[in-house]
Image: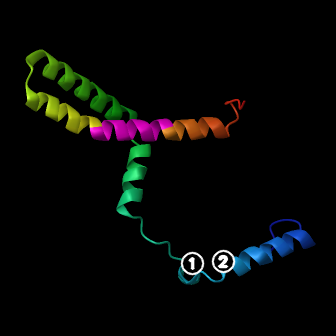
């Protein structure tokens, strides 16, 4: 079954080189033979969660963090500041993931200009 025009001689040669290079990867060959994808690691799952954080959740985290920061500054209690710091870690990670996703999507659409 062909999906398009046949490959040129040059394209066939390049494809053969790629297949030869990948032929030595036993893990890849085993995965391709069984057509199973390796399970996602914890890091990949957390990264996916950070880049797909819903806007309402992210907004709530930002507002709660800011409220705790203001409370800590107003009352001078270390516990409120500690809670603020604990809450800022996932908030900043999700914001960075969202900004990174937005930046890559914006760059791939051609709206960003290169100098």
Count numbered badges in the picture.
Answer: 2
Magenta stretch secondary structure, dominant: helix
Seen at 20% across and 23% down, the residue is 69
Q: Position of residue 57 (x, y in %)?
A: 32, 35
Tag 2 secondary structure: helix
Q: Residues within 10 Å of mark 2 (few under 14, many from 20)?
A: few
Does residue 95 show up magenta in the picture?
A: yes
Seen at 56% across and 84% down, the residue is 26
The residue indicated by pointer 2 is 22
Q: Which residues are magenta?
A: 89-99
Do the residues under discs 1 and 2 have CB atoms within 8 angstroms? yes
Which is nearer the N-term, disc 1 or disc 2? 2
Seen at 44% across and 41% down, the residue is 97
- Horizontal relation, residue 99 to residue 28: left or right: left
Q: Position of residue 67 (x, y in %)?
A: 21, 22
Tag 1 secondary structure: helix
In the displayed structure, 33 sits above or below 40; it is: below
- Horizontal relation, residue 52 to residue 81: left or right: right
Instruction: Choose between 36 and 99: the one closer to the eye.
Output: 99
In the displayed structure, 48 sits above or below 5; it is: above
The Cα atoms of the two marked residues, 1 and 2, are separated by 8 Å
Q: Position of residue 115 (x, y in %)?
A: 72, 30
Would residue 6 be seen by someone viewing this image from the given angle? no
Does residue 62 show up magenta in the picture?
A: no
Would residue 91 be seen by someone viewing this image from the given angle? yes
Seen at 15% across and 34% down, the residue is 82
The residue indicated by pointer 1 is 28
Q: Which quarter of the figure has residue 94?
A: top left
Q: How is the image coloured?
A: rainbow
- Horizontal relation, residue 95 to residue 11: left or right: left
Q: Residue furthest right?
A: 9
């Amino acid at each position: 079954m062909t999906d398009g025009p046949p490959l040129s001689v040059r394209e066939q040669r390049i494809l053969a080189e790629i297949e030869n290079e990948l032929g030595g990867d036993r893990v890849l060959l085993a995965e391709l033979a069984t057509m199973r994808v390796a399970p996602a690691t914890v890091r990949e799952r957390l990264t996916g969660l950070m880049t797909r954080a819903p806007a309402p959740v992210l907004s709530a985290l930002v507002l709660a963090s800011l409220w705790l920061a203001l409370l800590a500054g107003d009352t001078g209690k270390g516990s409120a500041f500690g809670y603020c710091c604990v809450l800022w870690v996932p908030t900043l990670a999700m914001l960075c993931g969202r900004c990174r996703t937005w930046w890559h999507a914006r760059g791939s659409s051609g709206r960003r200009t290169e100098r």
